[in-house]
Image (tube, coloured by chain):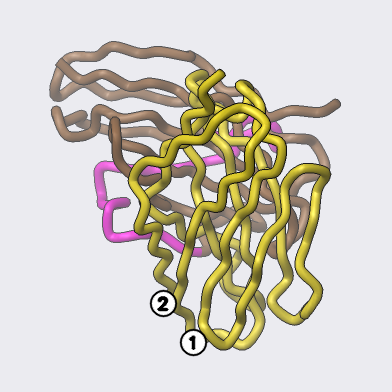
Chain colours: A yellow, B brown
Amino acid sequence: AQTVTQSQPEMSVQEAETVTLSCTYDTSESNYYLFWYKQPPSRQMILVIRQEAYKQQNATENRFSVNFQKAAKSFSLKISDSQLGDTAMYFCASNAGGTSYGKLTFGQGTILTVHP
Amino acid sequence: EPEVTQTPSHQVTQMGQEVILRCVPISNHLYFYWYRQILGQKVEFLVSFYNNEISEKSEIFDDQFSVERPDGSNFTLKIRSTKLEDSAMYFCAGKGGPDTEAFFGQGTRLTVV
């Protein structure tokens, strides 16, 4: 079984600044994948970034990057140059590889507010 | 860009009534899922569907729930006798492979009164 924990219910940041959202996970799988999803007020779930656990290099997507610490089972999301449109709920999620059929296990979410 | 479409966007139903939530996944996807999100809470896995059968289900997915993909296109979630606690946002998702990105629909907000 997999568990995902986000310990920050809410975060806020000024526009153009950098913010880091925390996530820890637990899994017995050797092959797994980690994701950050964004859920704006429209409630649509949008993939922000994806990390394969077997890759040591941290994933980056434009202003979004992760700090993946496999031994510590930590997977934080850094948002640089924050924009008002980044205001949303952010979910960390994992899925086990192999025969899990790809189901996602989500954390509790972090509400991020970007202030002008 | 292909997208996952869910209908209706909002459904209000009386307790004890049956509801069917509909999803049209992306055409080349093979793995399908239903998740639910009670207001203010995290997203919870309900069921996964692959090769025309349920591959995994959570303890939430009891006998009141069923899924099917009758025509190879629509993917439906049926709740036979709704309860107040079934009120939630229901998300359909699909994947091309088990470890690829999940594409989510925009959700159906179910309100049981």
Question: Mark 1 sits on what residue?
Answer: A28
| Distance of label 2 from label 1 (alpha carbons) | 7 Å
Question: Mark 2 sits on what residue?
Answer: A1
Q: Quadrant of residue A15?
A: top right
Residue A35 or residue A110, whichever sits in front: A110
Q: Quadrant of residue B66?
A: top left
Label 1, secondary structure: give it.
loop
Residue A103 or residue B41, whichever sits in front: B41
Left or right: where B89 falls relative to B95: left
Judging from the image, mark 1 belongs to the subunit labelled A
Which residue: 70% across, 32% down?
Answer: B73
- Residue A8's x, y, as percent? 37, 51
Left or right: where A72 falls relative to B58: right
- Residue A116's x, y, as percent? 56, 18
Which residue: 60% across, 65% down?
Answer: A101
The residue type indicated by label 1 comes to Ser
Specify start and end residues of the magenta stretch as a single range.
B56-75
Which residue: 45% across, 55% down?
Answer: A106
